[in-house]
Image: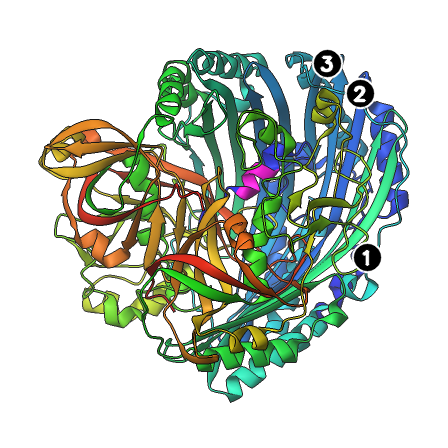
Amino acid sequence: MTDRRDFLRTTGAAAAAIAFASTPRRAGAAPALDHLDRFQSGASKELLLDAINAAKMAGASYADARIARIRQNFVVTREQQIVNVVDTDTLGCGVRALVDGCWGFAATRDLTRDAVTTAAREAVAIAKANRIARDRSVELAPVQAYPNANYKSAYTTDPFDVPLEQKVDLLLRANAEAMKVPNVKFVNSILFFVKQEKQFASTEGSVIDQTLIRSWPLFAATAVKPDFSDFQTRQGAEAAPMGRGFEYVLQCDLVGNAKKWGEQAAEKLTAKPIEVGKYDLVLAPSNMWLTIHESIGHPTELDRAMGYEANYAGTSFIAPPEDHLGKLKYGPSLMNIQGDRSQEGALSTIGWDDDGEKPDDFLIVKDGVFNDYQTTREQAGWLRDWYGRQGRPVRSHGCSYADSWGSVAFQRMPNVSLLPGTDNKSMDDLIAGVDRGIAIIGDGSFSIDQQRYNAQFGGQVFYEIRGGKLNGMLKDVAYQIRTPDFWNSMDAIGGRASYELGGSFFDGKGQPGQVNAVSHGSPPARFRQVNVINTGRQG
Amino acid sequence: MPMHSLRAIARHLSRAECEAIAKKVLGFSHADECRVTISSGVRANTRFAQNQISTAGDNYNNSVSIRAVFGKRVANVSTNRLDDASLRAAVENAERIAKLAPEDPELLPELGPQSYDEPIVWNDGTASLEPEARAEAVRAVTEPARRAGLISTGYLEAQAQAFAIANSAGLFAYQRSTGVAFTTTVRTQDGTGSGWAGAADNDFSRIDPRALAARAIEKAQRSVNPVAIEPGRYTVVLEPTAAANLIQLIAGAVNARSADEGRSFFSKAGGGNKIGEKVVDERVTLVSDPLDPRVPANTAGADGLPSERVNWIENGVVKNLAYDRFWAQRTGKAPNSAGGTLSMNGGDSSVEDMIKSTERGLLVTRFWYIRPVDPRTILFTGLTRDGTFLIENGRVTRPVKNLRYNESPIFMLNNVMAMGRPERVSASEAGGPGQAISVPPLKVRDFTFTSTSDAI
């Protein structure tokens, strides 16, 4: 599930977004050597080795340690003024230990030898305590050692090096363009940047150093009718969050797009309300990503299918695995869904996961048939039979992730994408094949049940399609789906040139909740006879 | 158990520690004005799945946020490092960024010293809920579930937080709060039935794990093999959790500025806001009161403004909206801070009475994946989950498949048929303590369901 409320809380409050996770041992005491200096000089790598050795000495069969620094920068504006500038910074070390097939985890914000080895011993103690209540032993799939690995995500300009004035100027110029449009009364815009620097070591012999940057320009123009009888908002959904730097923000052409977004907000005030019924839909990639996320990304998480998330995120309609792998017809044969952490600029793209595994590209849906789940080292063995029958080795797909040094790693979504078609269709080509339908651009309201069957999605702008052509704007549109029926109604997809990434910083899962940043690539796609409701009722 | 080593760790910063940090930060500051906000605390948690504990931990949070102001220029910087060098660096960083920021025309001077009511939101027992006690509570669910041949999953989280705020105008506040939530989902082995129960409080001793287990088990057993019914408008009996899932959405819409700007349900046609207008049934009163012992909150707000009781809706009429200091000054109103908790009054009906008086309707345990659809009407969508039943001729007759609704709490509170006694519930989707809320069970007519779901 994605949860933007956390984000709103963060940006709305001056009191800082923080990873909810540090360990204030001896709070307030000044250490001998500044932790940040230690981290930045690379000396903290020795601490990682100290930590995993301490865990081994205490009885762990496997241990890993992660030191991470996570920085966030928000620049928040409205209309022609600044609302907030926030910088957050958190640094610490988490240690995970496996003892007799049980996990334990502990973390500290003190980067000293004493603190990290104490955390390591605590992790072992918790693992031992958990042994009494465990039937099934954790077995980790084999992994190669990466003794000196480095990775830097696809950015050229570190947003944390860009002057504040440049960020503010960009937003205020974009705001001004939208405000020129009649009836556009309000604009909210935000630049949001995340930088994660992670050092990882495991008893498998890996030492991995990674730097990741994420950038997200957010924009919303609101038009209000002069008599206050209606208001409509257009969010700049096409400026997707990316695993890229400030150069990507500049490529988004916020100033140029702001005028269009403002005009569309105003046009929504006079758009025609949708009539309830069944329509053919042509969905732009900026709408598709969220539908893929909710109705394919989540039900193909193996821990959900096995019941581990039943109390919160839920289970999956694709369970038990043996009844569905190679059998479930998810969609038409033109449907291929790839899981990966390798697409350049995508949010989940990474060199190594938090198990120290190098992720591979894998087909979750192959020629329309369900083919694989998302896995970690702990989970890959659960699919041993399926992999064996296919002659594939048991190996993790590299989907382990913890959102902070103080959070325990578990299975999180990689980039999950609908691969483009081979015949190079465009969105216009798909529209040309619709007699009566709706084209939807941008993601809007979203909700899906706990097994990922029944979902409802909105959008940012909706156009009526008549006789293969766009015929004016609609409003109050939401489509309701039953997941397998919906995907099997897909009859055409765009080609490589039409493929785009969308995504979110805030995929929520787990208790206590953790967020994951993930991208979903898609071409535009066409669906036949989908149930559409009108959301604009007044009572 | 060797988990005792965890107990040596301070669970939150003390008043003296916060005063010392605040003094240091304000001493490092060269800005015209400086504010420091210190949050610390623990989220002690135990999670279970498949009738056994899967993870347990004590997650500590610790953050110092510094707000530096030069003239009308302002910036905020936060760090989790408390040593002098790190605090000094954070102050310098905030001041450097503030000087580069454009002027904020809405910036107001920092508040001077304030007086606060003594909060009643701390409980020692909750703050010291150790892993063993949590495991015992979990076993009170997993053991009966196992004996019944069912699979229980769930989550227990106890929070103990300290919040401190200080500024260069002499304001200082230090307050502590606790909150705890325990939720469980019990499913049948074959996945054809699912039941939920949960509770939230500030005081763990008021939560009864055995009672929760019994409720979730009963619902799991009774919900097996649900039948599909046609979506449409139904009379519904909403258990308190389901009612709270929707009523709490109103609290997210009471911003006075959005209303005055014309982009809220509380905007008035022609301009202004709906204060003074009747918007829901006259039996409904919605209040935030940080000193309500059922749903208490801190009495110091995020910017240092004292939190006090606010009546949002009284006998169906809008009495107040949320005014921050700037918008209050702009509109000539008093600013308010309400603490974030919510309570609704009730009536003397019981859930059993409501069922008995219903010819045909649905009994709803809770709602799930609740997301906004139309802010003009506070219309949300979501689904029923973990216990949805058909009522026929005054009796619960059979489980039904889950349904998706598209509904507004405003519409719903205009269609009230009966109200029961209010109770505090766990209404947070994520299963954490969330914001405290107390509401009654409700019987409501014409609740709009738009499709069915195969999910169990």
Specify start and end residues of the magenta stretch as a single range.
Answer: A5-9
Q: Residue B208 vs residue B10: left or right?
A: left
Q: Are marks 1 and 2 on the same chain?
A: yes
Quadrant containing the C terminus of chain B is bottom left
Main SS of residues in magenta: helix
Q: Secondary structure at mark 3?
A: loop
Q: Is residue A149 visible?
A: no
* x then y, percent, for residue B126: 76, 64
Q: Amino acid at mark 3?
A: Lys
* x then y, percent, for residue A391: 19, 64
Label 2, on which residue? Answer: B109
Q: Residue A389 vs residue A314: left or right?
A: left
Q: Is residue A216 visible?
A: yes
State how far apart marks 2 and 3 are (Cα). 9 Å
Q: Chain of mark 1?
A: B
Q: Secondary structure at mark 2?
A: loop
Determine the residue positioned at 83% across, 42% down. Answer: A29
Q: Chain of mark 3?
A: B
Which of the marked residues, 1 or 2, is nearer the chain's N terminus?
A: 2
| Residue sitting farthest toward the bottom | B147
Label 3, on which residue? Answer: B72
Residue B122 is tagged as: 1
Labels in figure, total = 3
Q: Amino acid at mark 2?
A: Pro
Q: Closer to the camera, B265 or B176?
A: B265
Quadrant containing the N terminus of chain B is bottom right
Q: Chain of mark 2?
A: B
Decide: is A170 above or below B25: above
Q: Secondary structure at mark 1?
A: loop
Q: Residue A8 in magenta?
A: yes
The residue carrying pointer 3 sits among few (fewer than 14), some (14 to 19) or many (20 or more) residues within 10 Å by Cα, namely some
Q: Residue A143 vs residue B280: left or right?
A: left
